Structure formats: structure tokens, C-alpha cells
Image (cartoon, helix red, strand yellow):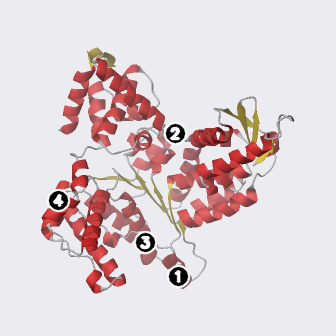
Amino acid sequence: MESTITDDSLRTTDTQIHAIGKALAEKVGQQKFEIWFKNSTKLTLAGGYLKVGVPNLFIANWIENHFSNEISQAVRSVTGTNVKVTFTIDPELSGRRAGSRATSSTAAKKDRHQSRFVTDRGTKRSAAGRNQKKRLKLSLDTFVVGSSNELAYNAATVVVNEQQSPFNPLFIHGGYGVGKTHLLQGICNAVCEKRPQTKWLYLSAEDFANQFILALKTKKLETFRQRMRRTDLLVIDDIHFLASKPSMQEEFLHTFNTINLAGKQVVLASDAHPKMIGQLSEKLVNRFVSGMVVKIESPDLETRCEICRQYAMNIRKSNSRTAHKKAAPALVPESVIRYIAENMRTNVRELEGALLKLIAFTALKNEKITPSMAKAVLVEHLERCDPIVHVSDIESAVATYFGITPTSIHSSKKNRTVALARHLSMYLTRKHTKMSSSEIGRVMGNKNHATVLLACKKIEALMQQNAELRWNGPGGNKISKAKAILAQLEKDISR
């Protein structure tokens, strides 16, 4: 990162720029700072403005969208004032490969940490050896199959067992903590065991986007494309992250087409059905629905019980190997397992967190696990376990009420009907789920968390006033009181 002293009378400017850079590194993290700021920006502080010079418009948009708050906070912490931040294209930065050496090193570390890539350079033995080192955490063997996920699991096993499966792409979607990532990693590990020579790549859509941007910055786009496209199995989690990112969608479309035309396999996971992901190009949606699209529902009671049994057993085995037998965690009685499964219906993570807390508590107290103890220890967990409500339930109820489609809620449309439906969806999701503002915004078309907060405030104000709301439904113009609309929507959601 370079600095420019714009006022000779202020000898402290250079020191301030250095301090701003240091504060910014602390806020965004050293790795992100080195990638995006250290050798790729030039800061100029003068006249109540901080001008951020960047090599091109693409990087300007990325830094502005992802780091504006951190930049403002860093400047305020150094100068003590609210300085306006502006972005400008700097010809000096545009004409050189800014930070290629540093970013290449960072990229290599990031790739090793965030993705798993296996290449076939010769014998099965060498490939198998590398695969063993690159194994992912979760496997199909530990995936608990029930009525809520049986179809998705069966589709995953077909991908593993068939050299060229009929499910291409395999698109798995569902809410948080229902097992999408578990299936994706399980597919990779199972393919690694069954066909050790397979070239496979597992990463999140955010990793794909970051590596794409890094390839643009370091002028290594062709290397990036070869790495992504010369795979036998490409597995990408959270594909909805690409929503509202046209250039990245275009890049992924070409990657998908190349792999698909070569008869290779693509597996994707998302929080929503392809048609429900807002601001996703029609070309990508068409590609995604051309294969097998399968939803994982929240686990039913018997599946939750089995998940609890398996998780408790795994904890006991793990601790027994590392601790003295007397210190091994107590057995979890079936009555306690059933009690937890009956009262916690949200997702797998909630179940595992409750069990872990209970087992840890009994280990510290050196007592047996009993139903009464479970009720006392897990009272906070149980108080937070309201009847489960999915975002899809909320969107469906709101869309039906206003006579639009859930896709419209995810879109960038701003007419009165869609805007009102979107605001109510965000408000109800915030009220009835544990999702953060950022998570809600991401699910509803990659909106900013500030947009969600503003929408919730608007609806709260309308409810306090019980204002008359107007919209255009399929049968013409409609009008109703805010509280009446909310009551009807909540009734529809709870059905």
C-alpha cells in the first residue's frame, strides 16, 4: 500500500496513512489486507476525504462493497473524525501487476486451506497417497439417513458408484444445518476411496469468487480456469453466493459447460432451489435444473434420535481413546436422547450442541446423565426452541398473500407490491428464525444486512401506527391494515 502526502504543511499525513493501514489490517485480518490493500491500493488523505486509488473498476467495486465500513472505522480511529471515503482508478496501479508476488504466496496458502484438489500424475498408488492426506472431515458412513434426506443420500451414492451418473449436475438444497455440506464432503471422500485416480475439487462459492478475483489481479486467469475445469468431479457449496455477481456467474457458467461437455460430474449445494435464488442468471438456472434437484428437509423425530445416538457414541469413543476409562463420558440414556430429539426440532447443529453441553457438564460433575439433569442443564436451549419455521415457509405465505412468486422477493424489483412483500418477509424471518440480518439478506437475493435492518424498522413503524397498506394484487388494487396483514401471514406460516 502506498501513501501520498498532499499537504506539505502537515508532516503527520504519512504517519496517519501508515496508522490507517495498520488499523485496517487489524479490522479485516492480515491475509485479506495483504490481498486487497497492501500492494493494490494507494491512499491519499486530504480535505476531509480519504481517496483510495485502485487498479481497475472491478477491484474498486469489490473493496467498496466488502470493506467500506472497515475503512471508515480505521480512518476514524486514527483521525478522530468521520472522513468521507472515495475510490478512484490510479493509472500507476493499473499499469503494473500490483502485489503479484505477495498475493500469489497468499493465494497458495489460501488454496491449501480452503480447497481440496487431487491430480492424477501417474500411478494409482501415488494418487491414493495424496487423497489420504487430503481427506475431508465428513463421510457418507456417518451420515444418518431418514425420510427427510433419503432421496438426497441415494442420489449421492449414485454419483459415487457411477463413472458417469445420470444426475449431472446434482443440486442439493435445504435449510441451515440439515446435512448439505456433510453429503458434499461425503461424496468427495467416497469417490476418493472408490476411484483414487479421480481429479476432484471441493470448495465454497465464496472461495471460487475470491480465487477468480485473485486470478484477475495477478493475471493468472488461465491457470485458474485450467485448475477449475480439468477436474473429474467439481463440488461447490453455497452456490447461492454467486447471486447478484454477473461476472462471476459468467465465469462459472463457462466452467460448468466445460466440465459437463467433457462428461464429468458437478455437485452443488444451496440454501434454496435454483429458481428461488434471486439475481441468478437464467442460463445458470437452466443448467442447474437440467440435472437432479433434490431438497433435504429438517430431520424427523426418529432421524433426530439416531443423530443424537451416533453423536453421543462418537464423543464417547473419542474421549475414551484420549482419557482414562474413569474419565470417559457417561452413557446417554435412551430417555434423554428422546427428550432432546422431541424438544429440539431446528437442525442437526442444535442437537449436537445440546448433547455436547450435557456430556461436558456430567463429565465435570462426574455424575450419571438423567432426564431431570438434562432438563435443568438444557433449559436455555429448550427455551429458544420455538416451533420450527423455515424461510421457504415465510416466503411462500407472503408470496401467496400478495399474488407474486417467491422469486420476485429475491429479485431487485422495487414496485410497491414486491417491496412490501420483501420487507414483510425479512421482518417475519427475523422474528421467527434465529438467522442474522446478514444471513437473511444473503438468502433473499444477496441483499445487504443494512437493507434487512431498514426493512424491519419500516414494518415495525407500520405496525405501531397500524397503517393502511396498499398494493396491487392479481384481482386489482388492495388495501388492508398492517396488523391484519401480519396476523394473517403468521397464521398462514404456522399451518
Give the residue pinned by disc 3: 189
Give the residue pinned by disc 4: 375
The disc label shown at residue 129, or none:
1
Answer whether residue 207 is visible to the viewer in this image: yes
Report how far apart the C-alphas of labels 2 and 1 lie in the structure. 40 Å
* Image quadrant where residue 445 sits: top left
Q: Residue at x 41, y 62 (%)?
A: 184
Q: Earlier in the sequence, mark 4 or mark 3?
A: 3
Report how far apart the C-alphas of labels 1 and 3 lie in the structure. 13 Å
**How far across and how far down the image is residue 130, in percent?**
54, 78
The disc label shown at residue 244, or none:
2
Answer whether residue 345 is visible to the viewer in this image: no
**How far across and how far down the image is residue 235, in percent?**
47, 60
Closer-to-camera residue (188/232): 188
Which marked residue is nearer to the observer: mark 1 or mark 4? 4
Report how far apart the C-alphas of labels 3 and 2 lie in the structure. 32 Å
Say few, some or many: other residues with alpha carbon within 10 Å of mark 2 (under 14 / 14 to 19 / 20 or more).
some
Q: Residue at x 41, y 35 (%)?
A: 410
Which marked residue is nearer to the observer: mark 2 or mark 4? 4
- Regarding mark 4 in the picture, which secondary structure is present there? helix
- Regarding mark 2 in the picture, which secondary structure is present there? loop
